[in-house]
Every structure is written in C-alpha cells, then in structure tokens.
Amino acid sequence: MITPALAQAIPGERPVELLLLLGAMALAPLALVTLTSFLKVVVVLSILRSALGVPQVPPNAAVTGLALLVTLLVMQPVASACWMRWQESPAPRGPEESLSAASRAAEPLRVFLARFATPADRRAFALLAARARGSPPPGGDAEEGFGVLAPAFVVSELRRAFTIGFLVFLPFLVID
C-alpha cells in the first residue's frame, strides 16, 4: 500500500528531472575518470607496478581501488565546495532551475580544472573547438568552458602522470 508520504517521494511527478538524473548517473564513471585526478593516480600506480617487475601483483582491482581512495581524498575539498554551493540555493523546481543550480555548483570544479590544465593545452583545445565551429580563434574567457577545460585537463594530467611514472621507474632501472 502506498502512503501519501511515499507517493510524494515517487519521482513520477517530475519525469524530466528523473531523466536528467539518470543521464547524469550514467555519465558518472566518465566524470570520475576525466574530471578528477583518478587517471593520473592509476597511471602512476600501474607504472610503479611495472617498475617492481611484478605485472600481476597487486591485481588490477587493487590498483584501481587504491587509486579511487586516493582520488576521493584529493578531490574531497572540491566536492565539498560543490556541495556547499548546491546547498546555498533553494531547492530547484523544474529542469531549467536544476540545470542552473548544477551550473553554479560546478564552479569549484571548473576552477580546479582551470588550475591544473596547462595554458598551452587550454589554448590548443580552444583553437580546435573554434576550428570545428568554423569561427575565429577565441581569446581569454573562451578557454574557460568545460568543453575546453576537460580535455585540456586530461591531457595535462596524462603528461604529469607519465612524467611522475618515469621518475618513479628510473631508480628501479638504475638498480637493475
């Protein structure tokens, strides 16, 4: 039997918001890999495992789990800032208000991405985006959108991961 309180909790009244929530949940693994330091941590740990000369110990699940825990520790201040921004605004009603609130809440993440994406990578992806649209090369603020910052951040993190991995691998190479 469905009580009135349970009937209010069932999201059938707002199907568009439910659809947006399900879409966001489906993209959560992609966001974990591309918008956090997870990729850098897992690459460095994998290179360290190879440097030790034991390609199967620890297993991939352990390396991924450890990378996830380190990522949660590193990204906790950003997630906390995003959550605080989400809590500042009143409860959104309708998909437009939900998207607007999500945009405001994502600002600390955008600042994090801009901080760790190198300027050269940001310019390169802004230029690629402008060429794809057929518009002139952008200046200043056009390099600050998620469409430019996310791939620039991923490329920057991969470059740093392989640099760190090389520096970790080098002593093992010298010892051998």
Image (cartoon, helix red, strand yellow):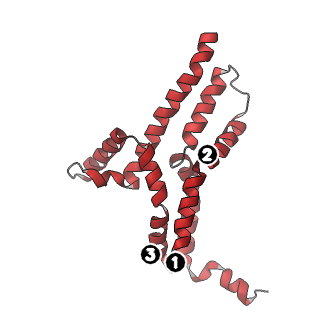
Q: Amino acid at mark 2?
A: Thr
The residue at 44%/55% (across/down) is 110
Quadrant of the rendering where the N terminus is positioned: bottom right
Label 1 crowd (10 A; few <14 / some 14-19 / many >=20): some
Q: Is residue 135 left or right of residue 64?
A: left
Res 176 seen here: no
Q: Are circles 1 and 3 on residues that touch, CB within 8 Å?
A: no
Q: Residue at x 72, y 83 (%)?
A: 6
> Would you identify the image quadrant in which residue 46 lies?
top right
Which residue bears the numbered disc 2? 71
Quick one: which residue is furthest to the left in this view? 136
> In the picture, residue 145 is in which quadrant?
bottom left
115 left or right of 33?
left
The residue beneath circle 3 is: 96
Determine the secondary structure under disc 3: helix
Label 3 CA crowd tier, 10 Å (few <14, some 14–19, many 20+): few
Q: Nearer the viewer, mark 1 or mark 3?
A: 1
Label 1 – label 3 distance at C-alpha: 8 Å
What kind of element bears circle 1?
loop
| Viewer-proximal residue among 45 and 168 | 168
Comes first in the chain, label 1 or label 2: 2
- In percent of width and height, residue 84 lies at 56, 66
Q: Position of residue 173 (x, y in %)?
A: 60, 14
Q: Which residue is mark 1?
A: 92
Residue type at tag 1: Pro
Q: Residue at x 72, y 33 (%)?
A: 59
